[in-house]
Amino acid sequence: MTEPDHEAPPALLLEKASKSFGAVHALIDGSITLYPGEAHALLGENGAGKSTLVKILAGVHHPDGGRLLVGDRRVSFSGPAAARDAGVSIIYQEPTLFPDLSVAENIFVGRHPLTSGRRIDRAEMRRQTTAVFRQLGVQLDPDRPARGLSVADQQIVEIAKALSFNANVIVMDEPTAALATVEVERLFEVMRALREQGAAVMFISHRLEEVFESCQRVTIMRDGRFVKTSAIEKLTIDDVIRSMVGRDLDALFPKTQTTRGDELLEVEHLSSEGVFSDISFSVRQGEIVGLAGLVGAGRSEVARAIFGIDRRTSGTVTVGGKQLPNGSPLAAMAAGVGFVPEDRRQQGLVMDLSIDHNVALASLRRLRRLGLIRRSSERNLANAWAEKLQLTFGRMKNAVSTLSGGNQQKVVLAKWLARRPSVLIIDEPTRGIDIGTKAEVHRILDELVSDGVAVLMISSELPEVLGMADRVLVLREGRLVSELSRAEADEASIMRAATGQLQGSPA
Amino acid sequence: MSTAVESPPPVVEAPVRRAEALLRARELGIVVAIVVVFVLTTLHNHAFAKSGSLQQLLTGASIIALLAVGETLVIITRNVDLSVGSVVGLSAYLVGDLFVKHPGMPVILGFVVGTGIGLGIGLVNGLITTVTRVPSLVVTLAALYIVRGIDALIVHGRRIDPISVPKSYSVVGYKAILGVPWIAIIVTLIVVAVGYAMRSFRSSRELYAIGSNPEAATLAGIPAGRRVVTAFAISGALAGLSGALFLAEYATVDATAGNGYELSVIAAVVVGGVAIFGGSGTVIGAALGALLLNTINQALVASRISAFWDQAIAGGLLLGTIAFDRWLSLRIARSLRSAEGARRDV
């Protein structure tokens, strides 16, 4: 491996960059230094601020603070075009192609080679595209439209696009997630070639073995902050995992011993073509089962299929001994299942409706008298639950959009708890809410299981999973790869299962 | 269903080429449809093939075809311009009024003024759409009513009569060279020029990119706002020019001129193979779509079929086109997928 030249000035330096969206601090201290000729991994849990950092480098987000140097010039990108012109090229996690344009046009859009009279030189465009593809060792027809390309091929087009810029800094945000082994190998060869030409490559991946195979240095982030940068040979995979998740667990997670009852929710061989397959597990009365895994592992999709929002291709879901029909949330609700979705603004609440309307929304059938719904019965229901969940609000008739994130989440909870569910599926119970309310939501969950509810909890926050769950199921790429008891589960064991390090690595 | 295993699709010789051929065949298909309608009608009524009637086919389609060119640019960016019919009316009356007040005015000025009026309205449409991010459907619907209202205020029950329009101006509407009406020549030149530009310039390819995937367009550094404003401006300008041509063709303009044109234009664009959600289609296809719809219209007249059928047939044709498009895109997607499998060397 060629050693990166640390004496040379950095190709890119980001220091103490910060970015907030409203009250959410997505990035507090984003710092990274990339030297010419190095492959540098950026690691962190979901929500650690990696994507925000990438978008700052891409010119998509404008940082609230901090400084950015490209080469030896301090820059402030006005937009993606400015970042590109400064020699920073980004390969996004999700391919960003134009389905109606040809492959070659996708690569050269906005900077087509021109002939006289500023007309597009299609022959030259095709020639350059073929040349880049040859460099990558792939055969794709430059003239075919991008529509219908597999995700892997789309990713290859993205990579070809980045290569054709002759960029000094290439940022790859999980480029390998959709690629097969052969294609990953080829990508690493390309990365090596790029480094030898003096480019700096920043590489984001959840597959730690890839990082150890192809990168020289690692920067680790946690909770929107820079943790450390280190040469790869000074670290083990366990060190990396510890730095990524290391956090204090305190009274944030109340946990009462409960007695487990019958199996209330049984999922058998649940599959959804192309998303997840053969998922089997059960949740007992009085227990919280945590569903862990990386973003994109299929956790939310499993939950949606259980509740019937998405149809399953095969398998059964049984609640309290009764099998649920496919694709019917109403049947799931009638069987006693509640579902608190991941995105409360889009899926959990009607933002412009009042607090009491939102609370009553799932119970309207029960509240109606002669087909009519009385305002007072809605309000009584909402008041009762607001008190129980210690909701902080101005007036019941205010729109839920005026509440803080934590209180909004309590309204979603109230809506479902008002139906007295026997099974509660809760996706990201505390995403984006402050620490105090987090503890309260956890207390509510704890009380629920004490009362005999079965809870299936999806969370990207490992401490939450560890603190609250009686058992942890780990999904990886649509498959259930591990089931850990509360005693067995720790951050390292979950991360290992989620990143495919199950066979154990030299510690 | 004994086995779930699918047999591999038969290997097709260069399926990509075939998919492309299908796309190209789109314009050809419209030409074929025009010829079929023409031949069938002529068999029924020999007068249909006479040169006067041929000229009528071209003249009658010209204005809608010209409007369809501008509309295509807008629709390609995933927007829509509903104001074009009103712009035609306003521009036609104002240009006519100019000739009433300044009878000696150079003829060319009439076209310039008409185009200018449309350009102004198009710019406003584009700016409001991109700055406020209100859907263009709503913005241009408002413009449709506002412009029509302004038109009614200005016209105020009067009208432009053929006497006020200079001979040297209205000649564009009815004179023909070698059997081809001037107006059709002008529109054809514009269609070909814009059609060429849409293939050959960066900024026009960027219109396709914006309509194909707006987010990716922003990430690729395409100045989407500026491009969309330009598309609306061109659509407006061509609508203004269409108004000036309307005056030349009919020489009579009142407050209803151009009423309802926007829907005929969108019908022509969709029949011409422009995807209503943006990203694909050609101006030549759209112009041919206008010609096809007008040919059907005239064929019904020549066959002495009630004109009431005209709209029903236009509607049926639209549904047929959309169904065909859907079928075609599914087919292309399938053939492209199998193409990929055949061409990967992994």
Image: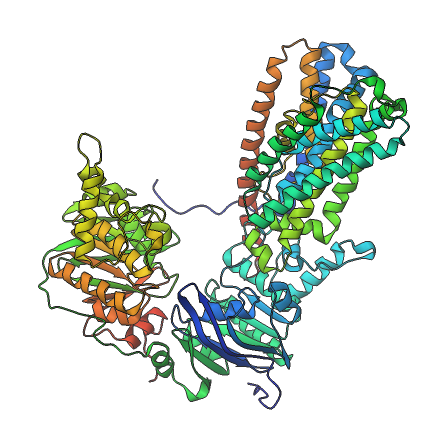
Residue B265: image x %, image y %?
65, 30
Question: Residue at (47%, 68%) from the top-left corner?
Answer: A52
Quarter of the figure that contains the C terminus of chain B: bottom right
Please state if A50 lies on the left or on the right of B4 as rendered.
Answer: right
Q: Nearer the viewer, residue A406 or A27?
A: A406
Quadrant of the rendering where the N terminus of chain B is positioned: top left
- Farthest-out residue, bottom: A7
| Towards the viewer: B111 or B22 | B111
Q: Residue at x 18, y 29 (%)?
A: A370
Whether residue B235 can be seen here: no
- Is A51 displayed left or right of A312 in the figure? right
Where in the figure is residue B238, as x and y percent of width and height? 74, 36
- Near-viewer residue (B193 or B92): B92
Out of A281 and A406, give the one closest to the viewer: A406
In the rendered image, the vertical position of residue A22 relative to residue B21, given as above or below: below
Residue A388 percent across, percent down from the top left: 16, 56
Q: Residue at x 62, y 74 (%)?
A: A75
